[in-house]
Image (tube, rainbow, N blue to C red):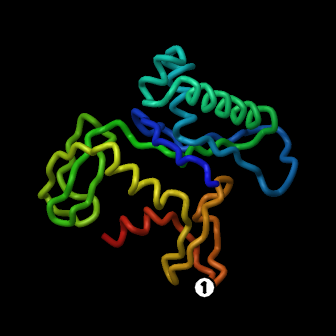
Amino acid sequence: MSPRPKRLRRVSNPPLVSGFKPYGGIARDEHPQSVFLHLEEYEVIRLCDFENLNHHEAARVMDVSRPTLTRIYAKARAKIADALVTGKQIIIEGGKIYFDSEWYKCSGCNCLFNQPEKSVAPSECPLCGSDRIINYVPSDEAIPVTLHSNVDICVCPACGFEKQHEPSRPCKEEICPVCSSRLMRKNNLLAKDM
């Protein structure tokens, strides 16, 4: 029996940086290891430790249950502790999330996109460049299906080879076994094609 699909977690804004690298000390091996902190784990740390919200308040902000938030928080703290103690770099990416921001729809290509910069309205579609943009209010089902179906797949833009994404390695570091091109996330490739 397959596990129950994860509900998308609400993240207020993307982080200002995409990770942290240790400096100083002695490298223990040639290939530095990384700890991948998912965006929902970053958001839990931001809400609980930076904004000083309790778990109940943070769970309401992220639109998850309190036990789910507590599990995410425990995983995030364990990953950060691992990075600090073992000298690994922290990369913030991925996860089952959506950004809590204004959503827009392009009337030209029917692309749905959001604008993390809440103070600036988009002037053109990021895919086709059209200026025919309307506000869009996503339903609970419209955005999760699109994001959930492609976020965990690496694809070769040259030959179409697909494989399950490994959380510990960015797709761009994977090489296609068929044509030796670099892989990329499937949802990024779909966005380029539209």
Tell me what residue is drawn at x 53 percent, y 20 percent. Answer: 50
Residue at position x 48%, y 22% from top? 58
Residue 52 locus on image (x, y percent): 52, 14
The residue carrying mark 1 is 179
Specify the amino acid type for callout 1.
Cys
Q: Nearer the viewer, residue 63 or 191?
A: 63
User: Which element type, helix, strand or loop, lies under badge 1?
Assistant: loop
| Looking at the image, residue 84 lies above or below residue 151 | above
Location of residue 161 with respect to 120 vertically, above or below: below
Image x and y of residue 147, in percent: 42, 54
Name the residue: 48% across, 42% down. 7
59 is higher (above) or lower (below) than 6: above
Q: Position of residue 159 (x, y in %)?
A: 52, 83
Residue lying at 61% horizontally and 58% vertically, measured from the top left: 170
Q: Is residue 169 above or below residue 122?
A: below
**Splitting the image into 4 quarters, where does residue 169 fall?**
bottom right
Q: Residue furthest left?
A: 132
Q: On the picture, is 100 further left or further right than 38?
A: left
Quadrant where the N terminus sits is: bottom right
- Is 59 positioned to the left or the right of 100 in the image? right
User: Picture quarter containing residue 189?
Assistant: bottom left
Between 46 and 146, the one nearer to me in the picture: 146
Badge 1: residue crowd in 10 Å (few <14, some 14–19, many ≥20): few
